[in-house]
Structure formats: structure tokens, C-alpha cells
Amino acid sequence: MANPLVSDRFIEFLLFDVLDAESLCQLPYFSDHSRATFSPWLAACRRVAREVLWPTYKPMDDAPPRFEDGRVFVHPTMKQCWKELVELGVLSASRPAEVGGQQLPLTVATLSHAYLMAGNLSAYGYAGLTTGAAHLIETFGSDAVKSMFLSAMYEGRWTGTMALTEPQAGSSLADVKSTATPKGDRFLIKGSKIFISGGDQDVTENIVHLVLARIDGAPAGTKGISLFAVPKKRVENGALVDNDVTVAGVIHKIGWKGLPSLALSFGDEGECHGWLVGPAHQGLKCMFQMMNEARLMVGVNAAATASVAFHESLAYSRERKQGRPLGVTDATTPPVPLTEHPDARRMLLRQKAIVEGSLAIIGLAAKFADLSEHATDDETRAESKLLLDLLTPIAKTFPAEKGFEANALSLQLHGGYGYSSEYLPESWLRDQKLNTIHEGTTTIQGLDLLGRKVIAGGGAALMALEKRVRASIAAAESAGLSFSKTLSTAMDELVRVTGTLGGRGASGDVLGMLGHSADFMELASTVAVGWAWLELAVRAAGKADDFSAGLVQAAKYWLNTEVPRATHLAHLCESNESSYLEVKDSQLDG
Ligand SMILES: Cc1cc2nc3c(=O)[nH]c(=O)nc-3n(C[C@H](O)[C@H](O)[C@H](O)COP(=O)(O)OP(=O)(O)OC[C@H]3O[C@@H](n4cnc5c(N)ncnc54)[C@H](O)[C@@H]3O)c2cc1C
């Protein structure tokens, strides 16, 4: 059977039985939608993912972009992929009708895009970046800036990028040095950016870079950063002319090979024109809209990359015959498929738990995104925003970190064949690693979660999450799912530890608060995904079919084997275990 990329049955179950996506259609913004519009959309995404993108994945992985005479040439098949993605309507799926969008709930758009990412993550990357960049202009751009860029981007004639990173300013965007000098209605931009995905290509006639730079005289740090739309080519007298954006080099990446990531130079000739987007000096604040959307997108990407690899290893494990069941020593009995071996089933169930748990926590976050924007009452909007903010670092980090482990398990199940490039798991493992790095590394997400999100509003977000977790535990108990008890303990630990660490922060002990932010991230993720698994299990409980029983088993696996780790993680955070806090640089050499 062909690799399904993502399980249709699971996505339908998640969307309609767990997230109740149809209930969103009662909100005025989504009132033109119903299951009757969601289903053809899902079908169209599946078709493009399976018939158009998936066949191009391996060719793109084998032949990365070429850099010749200052120009970047991507795989020729990307032109057809782009055409199909644009025709599908993926660029403006969730955007309002006024800008040509379909006003699809993010809940539906996000989960349907998982298919496209699982089919060919690089090809989807061009679309994801374009939507995010256009949305930024839609929200913060002046009418003049919107009319210059918006329709060209949403119609897919021009693509978009995010150009934040500089050689000296990666995680620390406060150190961005690119400059912007006022010139009439625009600015002259000068600076170097690195790793810019989609920064050049030969697919579309133009590219719009959303660039962070400092207006001359701006204060140091994040408060002096502004945001600019800087096209590769600007319009002059109705024609596109070169805008002094040059490719300084191509990054030779280990994955995501269909999407070029580049070093770009802006304004070498002093003729790079950029247009301010949003208020001066508030560029980073504006950029956070795109960064937060991109963080959720990275989470989906990670889940999708783990999903396609999981399905590959499942099919392989069912076919590959090796050895005999534990305890059978008679070598004349026929060998059995890998799936007959308990440890192979562990590796498969663990992948399933990571993939579907990731999709579920992302789906929950996406629904909070919909409600935070479009719910009709203030209270729901405010609480949903709190929960979205709390879950965003988790929905980015958990799928990326655990997805890498799932991808390694997929390779492991292929044995020696998995360690060869004739089989696909190694390529997804390479792809997956990026997700713990871009859009804020795992470290940065941990610091954000503990240093900001979880203590925001006096812990209001955590309280809102706790209310939901406790309700799920009660529902699980009523459904006879006794394994839910572990989550109750883990939730207690999370609340207690957050209080302790928050108290340390409030008293000025920053190291005492943040020294174990990585463990805190794992603790919070374990609890959040444990909650997502209970949400799935409660709806599947009591049904005899294999699909439902499989969900309950995966929930049981997660709640029995992972969630109890919360106690240890809580202890590390609270005791402020000091080995790496104390070890000196000079003591690290072997
Ligand atoms: C393939 C690829 C595509 C990319 N695409 C884009 C793009 O389209 N646009 C764009 O703007 N950028 C892009 N990036 C850049 C990406 O966002 C950065 O690589 C990332 O933010 C990390 O920055 P850095 O590489 O400079 O690493 P550094 O910031 O130097 O970090 C190195 C390590 O140190 C850790 N570290 C850093 N600071 C701290 C701290 N304060 N405390 C503890 N640990 C710390 C990090 O977690 C990391 O593990 C891309 C990167 C790659 C590899």
C-alpha cells in the first residue's frame, strides 16, 4: 500500500470527534462553512499531497538548488508544485474573503496542511512562508504597502520570506545590525542576512522579504528594531527593476533540500528600497505574529515528518520477516514479521503516540487560535489567547524534539537498510532536525515558556489549562480509563513547580528560576500531550474497532510510560540540580 503520509481516519477523528471543528461554523466569521465545505478541502489537500508533492520529494532531496552566476535555480519540478499549491488555494485558505481568502478555520487548515508537509516539506515551505509574510503585511502594512504587495503574494505571483537572522544575531535578535535610512516614502536598507529560506528561486517573478533592520539613530536592543517589506525587484514605472538584493551564498543543508536557504546581501550598491511595515521601532513585536504562526507551522511540520516516516516503518515492519517469536527456538518454524516482536511493536506504538499526540496538541492550539480571534464573547477570546500563547512553544518543541526520536525509531525499524539512502527514513531524520533549530531553538522556547508564558497574568494561562486537564481526567475516569491517574499527579507537579520557580523569579533569583528551563519544557510538554492523549482516548473508549482500540492503547502507553517522568523532571527543576550550572568551561575538556 502507498504511504498515506498522514492517517485520514485519525485526522477525521481529531477534527470532528475531538476538536468538534463543526462547532466553529456557529461563529459569524466561519458561518459560510460546514462539514460539507471542510471535506472537499481535506480531499483536495490529500490529492495534491499524494499525487503532486509526494512523487517530487525524493528527486528534490537528491538534487538541491544550484547557485550559478549569482542566481539560484531550484529543482525544475518545483514550478509545477507551486502552480498546484496556488490553485489549491493554500496561500490564503484561512485569510478573509476581502483578500481573496476562504476564511477556513485554522483548525482545519492547519491539520490539512500536515498532508502537504508530509508529502514534500520543502515544497510546502514556499507556501507557508508566503502566507506568513503576506499576513504580516495584511495586519500591519499601510494601504500603500498593501496595494504594492498583498494581492501579488496571496495570488502566488510573488513569494515571501522572513529575513531576521544575521551572522551575529541568531537566537539574540536584539543584536540585529541591518540599517534603514529614510528616503521619502521609503527607506534604503543595508545589511547581511543568513539562512533565509526561499531567499531566491526561479519559480516566481518576484520575492518579498520581511526584513528586520534599525532606522538610523534607533535605540539599541529589541526596542530599536523595525520591520520592512523589501522586494527582490521593485516596481518602477510599471516595470519590475532590480532592488539591489543579492545572493551571497547558498547554505549546503543536510535536509529540506528542495527549499534554498541563503546568505543575502541588502544594499551593496546603496539602492535597496524597503517599505516600513507597522510602527517604527516595533518591528520585532509585529514580527512575532509571523514567528508565532511559523512556530505552530514548525510543529505541524515536525508531526508530519514523523508521520510519513512512521507509516513507512509500519508498512516495512509488516512485510519484513525476521526471527521467531520470543521463546520459539525451533529454526524450522517460519520467520515472523517484525510486528510480531514486542520491542518492534514498542517502537511502532511510540511513534504513533508521538505523531498523533503531536497532531492533537497542535489541533488544540489551532482551535484556541480560531477562538482567540473569532469567538463572539470577550471572555472566550481572552482565555483562548492565553491558552494559545501557553501552548505555542510546546506545540513547536514537543513535535520537533520527540519527532526526531520518532524519526530515529523509523530508521531503526528498517535495520541496516534504514542506514542507507536507498530507503527514505534517513532523509526524514535529516529534515526533522531543523525543527528544533529554526523559529527559535528548543532552548529559546523553554526560556519563553517558563520566563514568560507560564507565569503571564499571575499564572492565568496555566490555571486555564489545568481546568481543562482536570475535566479530561474526570471524563477519563468516568470512561473507566484508570491510566489517567498519572496525569493528575503530573498536573499537580507542574502547578507546584511553576509556583516555586515563579517565586524564585519574583525574588530576583533568575538562575534558580530558569536554570532548568529545558526540564521544565519537557515537564509541561509531557503534561500537555498527556492531556491531548486523554482527549483522544475518552472519545475512543468503549468502541471495539481496531482504530479506537489502537488509540486507547497509545494513550495508555503515553500515560503509563511517559507521564510518570513528570515527577523526576519536577524534582530536577525544584532542586535546581546544579551539575551543569556549576561546571566550569575549563572542566569540560576530556
Ligand atoms: C535551514 C535553516 C533555515 C532557516 N531559515 C530562516 C529564515 O527563513 N529566516 C530567518 O530569519 N532565519 C532562518 N534560519 C535561522 C534560524 O532561525 C537560526 O539558525 C536560529 O534562530 C538559531 O540561531 P543561530 O543559528 O545563530 O544559533 P545560535 O543563536 O548561535 O545558537 C547556537 C546554540 O546556542 C544556544 N543558545 C543561543 N543563545 C542561548 C542563550 N541565551 N541561552 C542558552 N542557549 C543559547 C541555542 O539554543 C543553540 O543551541 C534558518 C536556519 C536554518 C538552519
Image: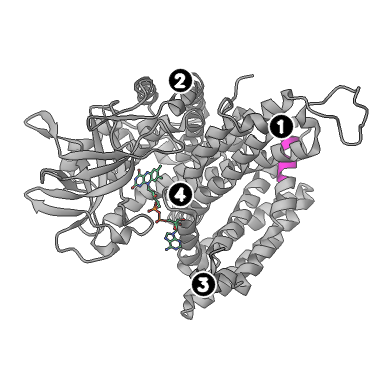
The answer for how far apart the CA atoms under marks 1 and 4 are is 34 Å
Query: Residue beneath label 4, please?
Result: 437
Residue 305: image x %, image y %? 54, 36
* Res. 584 mark: 3
Q: Are marks 4 and 3 in contact (CB under 8 Å)?
A: no
The answer for how far apart the CA atoms under marks 2 and 1 are is 28 Å
Query: Type of residue at label 1?
Result: Phe
Q: Nearer the viewer, mark 3 or mark 2?
A: 3
Confirm if mark 4 falls within 8 A of ligand 1.
yes
Query: Residue beneath label 2, please?
Result: 52
What colouring style does the render use? Answer: one colour
Residue segment shown in magenta: 547-555
Quadrant for residue 221, please give it: bottom left
Question: Front-most of 167 and 90?
Answer: 167
Q: Nearer the viewer, mark 1 or mark 4?
A: 4
Mark 3 or 2 closer to N-term? Answer: 2
Mark 1 or 3 closer to N-term? Answer: 1
